Image (cartoon, rainbow, N blue to C red):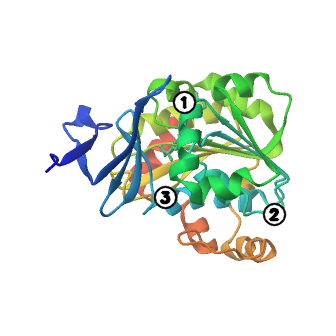
Amino acid sequence: MAEKRWIAETLFEEFGFRMEFHAERVLYEMHTEHQDLVLFENKHFGKMLMLDGATQVTTRDEFIYHEMMTHVPLFAHGSARDALIIGGGDCGIAEEVLKHKAIERLVQVEIDASVIEFSKEHFPEFTGPVFVDPRFESVIADGMKYVAETDRRFDVVIVDSTDPQGPGAVLFTREFYAGCKRVLKPGGVMVTQNGVPFFQPDELVGSVRHFHALFADAACYVAAIPTYIGGHMAMGWAADDPALRQHPAEAIAQRYRAAGGFATRYWTPEVHRAAFALPRFIAERVEAAKR
Ligand code: SAM
């Protein structure tokens, strides 16, 4: 009888905390050119992708993060045609963006081709509809380099990065955010995967400080994602028009209906609006970052 294999989430080891998931079956395991990658099946969470000891996506709760990282900026913007994803290798974000039929071009810049290749085999529910969509373009490159050099411009930039370790570290720097600002069209918005403030407050504070130096409106919104352990997850928000994040739920609902009212399991116009109401301990850190 094979020894039971437990796979550890080691992201928060510095706090004397680690968590382990039982791997019913390990589907793919390798050290890619950029990071340690393991894909396995867990009885409760389904398929789980771990990169450098940090949970990236699970089939059981991926809908929360993927819906909130896409429908919030797209419905807040209201007339996005060109979108950019930095990271996003599993293609869960791309699948949600492409549900917006008004989107004309979606570029995804992922540094690690291995993540995309095995996602095609193991996350076909994401990659299937994405790679047959003529609006989608996959670029294998460092997101930092891409935003510094491309002549393309975008209405929405979604930074679906790993945590600030390994190849993802550069995606939390002022230089990278300045590049994102550079490629945004007037009226554009950037959202970022910004960790769990209960465990990673400095990550959020650092990003908001950079946003505040580059944009007129620096903020974040939150969602509760079970496998991003530690309570609320923060999604960074940067735009030059503060009104973008202040639309009432009814205005968002009208845009949602006009977009065809496609099925969602977490995002709703009311949840969209409420996500910007921050628990005090998070709001205080965000405001302190702007002083
Ligand atoms: N939802 C996950 C989370 O919240 O942690 C992130 C999902 S996605 C798998 C993260 C992707 O960012 C990975 O595929 C990783 O290869 C990619 N990535 C890391 N650093 C990058 C960089 N500098 N440029 C482009 N992609 C990068």
> Which residue is disc 2 drawn over?
101
Image x and y of residue 164, in percent: 46, 30
Image x and y of residue 224, in percent: 43, 60
Q: CA distance from mark 2 to mark 3?
A: 22 Å
- Report the residue at 70% width, 53% height from top: 130
195 is higher (above) or lower (below) than 78: above
Amino acid at circle 3: Glu
In the image: residue 50, left or right of residue 256:
left
In the image: residue 103, left or right of residue 67:
right
Looking at the rendered structure, the secondary structure element under dot 2 is: loop
For the residues labelled 1 and 2, say whether their Cβ atoms are less than 8 Å apart.
no
Q: Residue at the far front: name it.
A: 1
> Which residue is disc 3 drawn over?
62
Amino acid at circle 2: Lys
Question: Residue 172 — which label?
Answer: 1
179 is higher (above) or lower (below) than 220: above
